[in-house]
Amino acid sequence: MATSSPTSDQIYDRQIRLWGASAQARLLSATVHVLHVSGSLSELSKNLVLAGVSVVLVEVSPAPVTRGDVAANLLLRAGDEGAPSAAALCRDRLLPMNLSGSVSLASHATLAGYIDSLPGAAPSVVAASGLGFGGLAELAEALPAGTSLVVADSLGPCALSLHFLRDPAGEPGRFKYTPDDVNGKEQGEEEEEFPGVGEVLAIEDYAELKGRWGPVSPIFVAWACLHSHPSYPSFPPTFDFPSHARSFLSSRSLPPDFLGGGAELAAMFACHGSPPPPAASAVFGGVLGQEVIKAISGKGKPAGNVLTYDAVTGQCGESRVPPKNK
């Protein structure tokens, strides 16, 4: 006896009950580019595929899989070390989870090559990792008008994400959404303003930022300290992280002990380049999945545009950096 394939409504019945048919329809028509699938972005990719979102895994300057890649990527396995492409393996393992959208691979020799491909692609969201300030600025400048950007990185057991949401049909820097239903009643549409990437990267006085933001996260400061350096991500073996950190803190109007003393600084920056604990990637990638789904569906109030997670203490942090004129 022949059996019919389940319909989209049947496949995503639980999700439709949660956020509605129109939100699910937006997910099924969306495409997310994942630039450098590793750490929390591997968990994010899995969650998006299960929700019906089409995912493009973007690799720049592909290189053989290392032991660190296997440790950081939840989609890789112990025997994958030495394989020519981590992104290709991730695609193959995501494909069986895909029921409606697509999972594909895009390979580029340079970041500039990927940026040149963006006008014809117009993804709903780009989720990126492993870029310095220069690369982030170039990427943000090239994004199509309605494409949101989520930046996710790790520093040993700590993780951080920056969210720059854009409404597909609205003004740049503005994001419209429908809050979650209260007592079964739909809520009216609301709007949030998000500063641009260039505005956040250009902040030089973190004391001034504190007035707009509230307490400044040490995880954000450590991330900015590393990613703002022209050598990122390839620091020379003799690079003096503590001296660089003290100079960075001084230039940002922060006290020299803001990130701890010399031994604490050395230990913190020794984590640079080391894979995050898998549990940290799983937890933070799950949080990112919820936020990217909000960005696509327009359903639910987005979290602050800076999220942090410390796997040692188990604490999550949320900050909302308003535009400078607010």
Image (spheres, rainbow, N blue to C red):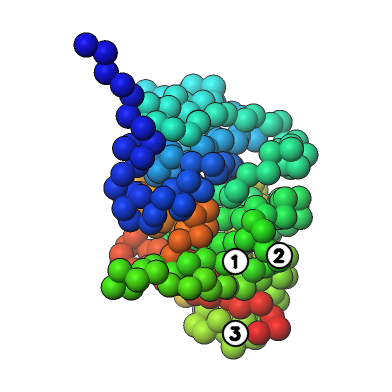
Q: Name the residue under label 3.
A: 212
Quarter of the rendering containing residue 35: top right
Q: Earlier in the sequence, mark 2 or mark 3?
A: 2
Gap between marks 1 and 2, in whole Å? Answer: 8 Å
Look at the numbered disc 1 and give the secondary structure of its residue. strand
Instruction: Estimate the x, y position of residue 267 in percent, counting from the top left.
Output: 45, 61
- The three-letter code of the residue at mark 1 reads Phe
Residue 228 rendering spot, x and y as whole percentages: 67, 61
Number of other residues with Cα within 10 Å of mark 2, as a class: few under 14, some 14 to 19, many 20 or more: some
Residue 77 x %, y %: 36, 29
Inspect the image, locate mark 2, and give the three-letter code of the amino acid beneath it: Pro
Give me the residue at 39% from left, 54% from top: 20
Question: In the image, which disc is placed on residue 172?
Answer: 2
Q: Position of residue 116 (x, y in %)?
A: 78, 39
Q: Name the residue under label 1.
A: 175
Q: In this view, does 263 lie above or below 279?
A: below
State whether residue 263 appears in this view.
no
Of 12 and 114, which appears nearest the observer? Answer: 12
Residue at image location 65% in from the left, 84% down from the top: 326
Q: In this view, does 284 lie above or below 76?
A: below
The image quadrant where one finds the N terminus is: top left
Q: Residue at the location (37% across, 26% down)?
A: 96
